[in-house]
Image (tube, grey):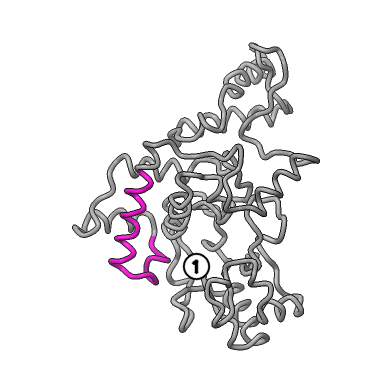
Amino acid sequence: MKRREFIRSLAGVAVSLTPASLLGMTPSAMAQVHEVQDALMESGESAALSAAEGRAVPLPDLPPRLRGRELENYLHRLRAFNATHDGDVFLDAKRFDLLRSALARFERIQKTIGFGNFYLLSFDEAVHLAQSRAEVGAFTVDELDFLEQIFYERALLYGFYGEKPMKNLTDQIDRSEVVKVPNSGNHLYRGKPLEMYTLLRRRVGSKLILTSGVRSVVKQFMLFLSKIHEGNGNLSRASRSLAPPGYSYHGISDFDVGQTGYGQHNFTEKFVESEVFKHLHAMGVLSLRYPRDNLTGVRFEPWHVKVDV
């Protein structure tokens, strides 16, 4: 069989997969789907031929090209990020139950070792700690499978289109490369992140505070699962508010800033009204990871400092 004919035979399999059917696949099965779709892209086939209907069907695992009404709908969902929208992807009942039990286990681990230590905890360390501490309890096989699926599923299936800087579930934070920032409970990477934060503090003053720094895969997991739980299993809604585990640049460089006395407003759009943000904006040195109406699928985050490393 010629390569082109072989590629097109694979297309018939690829088009039968919808976002709902892709969710929950094992990593090995997902890898096979990725191979098929990568081969289709490499071959120059922008669409696969549906034998049943004899027409071009777009692949479900590629970011949309947003134009016209599609762009308007996308921006509406982004701006109303906490609402439920048509097309949002939800966990089924079984996976939602696994989310709740895994999330409760992460919460018990955080309570056991403290917030600061939890920020840097690797997945392997979390699993080992859970096994060794009766007050936490070992992760079940089903819970581990669920967490692995969430990590390795392509997040664009439920609406997140950002890059994935941490590719492996077991990626670790090198503790020798981070420093704890006094009076913040958070850490920053040495080099550019720490230099950027020091510069901002020097120019803005003590009103500028670090509200979130380095986050491990485990910490991002806990934040993301909490957001899914809050939305009754809505993966799309959660990903409009924060990056899924592995996709967060807090794992390699970024950090969040706020203003003293501003409380929860530091994590809302109201932060643009703060003295700290106005000062940062006027300085012209602030680069945001998620600017207004960005195309990564995440709401506007005026507090999230982008650090390229």
104 to 30, vertically: above or below: below
Q: Could you tell me which secondary element the residue under label 1 belongs to?
A: loop
Q: Quadrant of residue 202?
A: bottom right
- In the picture provided, is 241 more to the left or to the right than 96? right
For the residue marked with disc 1, what is the amino acid?
Answer: Val
Where residue 92 appears, as percent x and y from the top left, is 43, 36
Where residue 213 appears, as percent x and y from the top left, is 51, 70
Image point (55%, 41%), residue name: 154
Q: Quadrant of residue 63?
A: top right
User: Within 10 angstroms of label 1, few (less than 14), some, or many (20 or more) residues?
Assistant: many
Q: Residue furthest left?
A: 134
Q: Name the residue under label 1.
A: 214
Where residue 64 appears, as percent x and y from the top left, is 70, 38
Image point (60%, 66%), residue name: 268
209 to 292, vertically: above or below: below
Q: Quadrant of the N terminus?
A: top right
- In the picture provided, is 191 more to the left or to the right than 233? right
19 to 307, vertically: above or below: above
- In the picture provided, is 116 more to the left or to the right than 245? left
Q: Quadrant of the C terminus?
A: bottom right
In the image shown, does 124 or 210 lie closer to the viewer? 210
Most frequent secondary structure within the magenta stretch: helix
Q: Quadrant of residue 133?
A: bottom left
136 to 273, vertically: above or below: above
Residue 101 in the magenta stretch? The answer is yes
Magenta stretch, residue numbers: 98-121
In the image shown, does 85 or 300 lie closer to the viewer? 85
Where residue 129 appears, as percent x and y from the top left, is 27, 59
